[in-house]
Image (cartoon, helix red, strand yellow):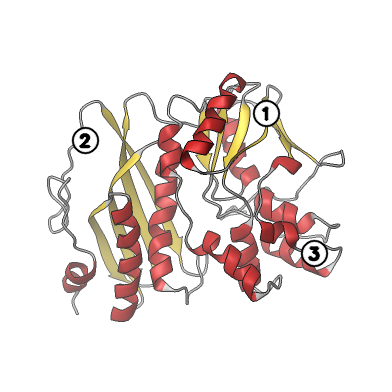
Amino acid sequence: MSEFSLIARYFTRPTPSAVLGVGDDAALLRVAPGMELAVSTDMLVSGTHFFPDAEPFLLGHKTLAVNLSDLAAMGAVPRWATLALSLPGEDEAWLRAFSSGFFALAESHGVELIGGDTTRGPLNLSVTIMGEVPSGTALRRDGAKPCDDIWVSGALGDAALALAHLQGRVTLDAAQFAACAPALHQPQPRLALGQALRGLASAAIDISDGLLADLGHILERSQVGAEIEFAALPSSAVLRSLPTRDGEAAGSLVASLTPAPSPGGSGELRARCILAGGDDYELCFTAPQARRAEVEQLAQRLTLPLSRIGVIKSAPGCVVCAAEGGEIRLEASGYDHFA
């Protein structure tokens, strides 16, 4: 099968909202009047972002989901995507499953695949996502103000826990793994939340590298600090139920999250998953305290838990307050490709 036959068979679909889609040297798009174009690119590399034997349908979903999460953090409505694939060989069963997972999520959010590229090489997947947002309303990282509330959506830590299990660094039973694996393999981009936060949130970001790392980007861009209450951080029943004892279990997971681990006391397993695990793809956002009731009403309307986890401070830095007093300190705040 040639490169062009591969594209035609697995990655060509109608693109009614594009002036010109797949099949030419470039796509042609027309942005609606009064809208701005939001654009983001993410690359997933085999062995770095996913296991080489990852189930292709789920991988197709996640390849697009991580990009949609970026648009959610901007409050944008997704419209178009391009997909670049580096493939080690021609595997029609893999391509069929991967494209099915990709397009299932794309169609559920009205995304049209309008172009891309394929080449032979190590398995790499790169998507550029494009969306529209009303002019001047995009959510940004630089708007947090002292005394703003800090919020997160959903629950944190399950993806990191599932990854640690797959790496053999912690052992979950079948029911526990089945409960947390979807967070790793099929994250759900919070697009409806991001769009609803336009005009309400003062700053926003999606959590891909870990809560502390990504919140840190808001703090840096907004030139503020934060105080987080660890007891307020939302986590699943699986993570809360784990026996986080001293020694091997906690220390094993720490090894997967930081380059120079030192086993900690009970509770460190949960703390590292929630604060620095990454791959959550939930939204972290700030909003004025005066609008707290509006955020709570939004949670009810979207049937999505939104947890108030702390407050923005004027002094730089981020302090995580333990329930029993004192601070929680981690050697690493999240994932860094070059650390």
Look at discs 2 and 1 and give the one toward the viewer.
1
Q: Using the image as rendered, state which of residue 159 and residue 123 is in the foreground.
A: 159
Residue 58 in the image: above or below residue 155: below
Q: Which residue is mark 2?
A: 31
Marks 2 and 1, the one that precedes in the sequence: 2
Q: Using the image as rendered, state which of residue 179 and residue 90 is in the foreground.
A: 179
What kind of residue is marked 1? Val
Q: In the image, what residue occupies the spot 40% across and 35% down?
A: 195
Q: Which residue is mark 3?
A: 243
Marks 2 and 3, the one that precedes in the sequence: 2
Q: Is residue 296 left or right of residue 271?
A: left
Marks 3 and 1, the one that precedes in the sequence: 3
What kind of residue is marked 2? Val
Quadrant the C terminus occupies: bottom right
Q: CA distance from mark 2 to mark 1?
A: 37 Å
For the residue carrying disc 1, how many other residues have a C-alpha within 10 Å: few (<14), some (14-19), or many (20+)? many
For the residue carrying disc 2, how many other residues have a C-alpha within 10 Å: few (<14), some (14-19), or many (20+)? some
Q: Say what secondary structure mark 2 lies in.
A: loop
Q: Is residue 266 left or right of residue 234?
A: right
Image quarter of residue 28: top left
As drawn, the label of residue 311 is 1
Q: Residue 46 in the image: x percent, y percent?
A: 47, 69
As drawn, the label of residue 67 is none
Q: Is residue 34 left or right of residue 151?
A: left
Q: Is residue 257 visible?
A: no
Q: In the image, what residue occupies the spot 36% across and 76% down?
A: 88
What kind of residue is marked 3? Pro
